[in-house]
Each structure stands twice: as C-alpha cells, then as structure tokens.
Image (spheres, rainbow, N blue to C red):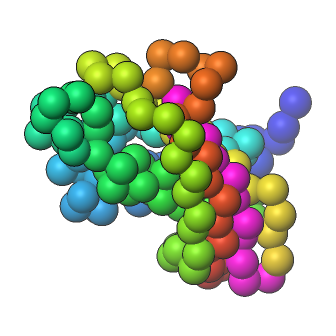
Amino acid sequence: MTDPSSEEQIEQRQRIARQFIEVIPHARALGMSFGELSEQGAEIWLPWREDLVGDPRSGVIHGGVISALMDTCCGAAVMVHPTGARSTATIDLRIDYMRAATPGQTIRAKASCYHITRSVAFVRAVATDDDDSRPVASATGAFTIER
C-alpha cells in the first residue's frame, strides 16, 4: 500500500494530465476524453463522428485525426509518469498506420513511457477500435520533460 503522500502525488499528476487535454483546443474540438490515467500510462478515447471522416465513401476517420489522438495520448502518458513532468512537448513521433479504423467505432489510444532520461521521455502507443487484436495504428515518440 502506498503512503498518503504518494497517493496525493498520483492524484495530482492525474489532475495535471486531465488539464493538459482540456487546454489543447484541437483535443476538445475532436471530442477526445480520458479512459484511464495511471502511473503505467494514459488511455484516450475518440468517438467516431461524421465530421472527422477523411473519405466520405468509406466513412473512415482521417489519418490526421488518428495522429492527433496518438500525439495527445503520448503527451498525457508523460504527464502522469512518476517522474513528475510539469510540461511536455513532442520532439519526434512516428506513427505506423496498420489498417483503416472501422467506421462508426470509437478509437482508443493507449500510451506508456518505456524510458526516461533527465529531459526526454520515450513513449509507445497503440490505437484500436472494437477489435483489440488488430491495431489501427502504433506509435513511438520522444517528448521533452520539464520538471
């Protein structure tokens, strides 16, 4: 069991991460919301909407929307990491698109930091729709850390 100060620190990091998404205008405009925030990382949901579709014939969400979701989720994972980052910014983000998301389904991105230095966090993420066994996209990135 963690001591109260550790629990307070975890809650504070979660509050900061939630504020992080609330102040990003495109995250609000796209309708992103948190699924889970923990020391292990972040999960952000993006519900399907017609105005986010890139190809009206197929109904598939635009790749740029998926990119924004992955970037935001990775940043949130940095913010909830136990190192206590006060802010972060994307240095580099590589996204591999594996398949089109199923039209009408919510996309869920999950990200976690796998290595931290004094000033850089290295993050991995995956985005799925209702079929968790077949990712829509995966990402790796480097993010600044300001403590």
Please tell me whether residue 121 belongs to the stretch shown in magenta: yes
Q: Position of residue 143 (x, y in %)?
A: 62, 73
Range covered by the magenta-colored residues? 118-128
Of the 4 image quadrants, the one containing the C terminus is bottom right
Count of labels in the image: 0
> In the image shown, does 95 or 31 lie closer to the viewer?
95
Residue at 51% in and 76% down: 89
**Residue 66 in sight:** yes
Q: Residue 70 magenta-drawn?
A: no
Please tell me whether the stretch drawn in magenta is mainly helix, strand or loop.
strand
Q: Is residue 136 above or below residue 142?
A: above
Residue 104 in percent (x, y) is at 27, 19
Q: Tell me which residue sits at (21%, 29%) in the image.
A: 59
Q: Please indicate whether residue 25 sits to the left or right of residue 75 in the image.
A: left
Residue 79 vertical placement versus 118 (above, below): above
User: For this view, does 31 lie left or right of residue 8?
Assistant: left
Can you give x and y, in whole percent of width and height, for residue 18 in the image?
43, 49
Which residue sits furthest top? 130
> Which of the 4 quarters of the picture holds residue 39?
top right
Viewer can see residue 80: no
Q: Residue at x 72, y 83 (%)?
A: 119
Given the current orientation, which residue lies at the most extreme front position?
A: 57
* Image coords of residue 146 (percent x, y): 61, 81
Figure quadrant of the N terminus: top right
**Is residue 69 toward the left or the right of residue 115 in the image?**
left
Vertically, is 112 above or below 36? below
In the image, what residue occupies the spot 40% across and 30% down? Answer: 101
34 w.r.t. 69: above or below? above
Q: Nearer the viewer, residue 78 or 102?
A: 102
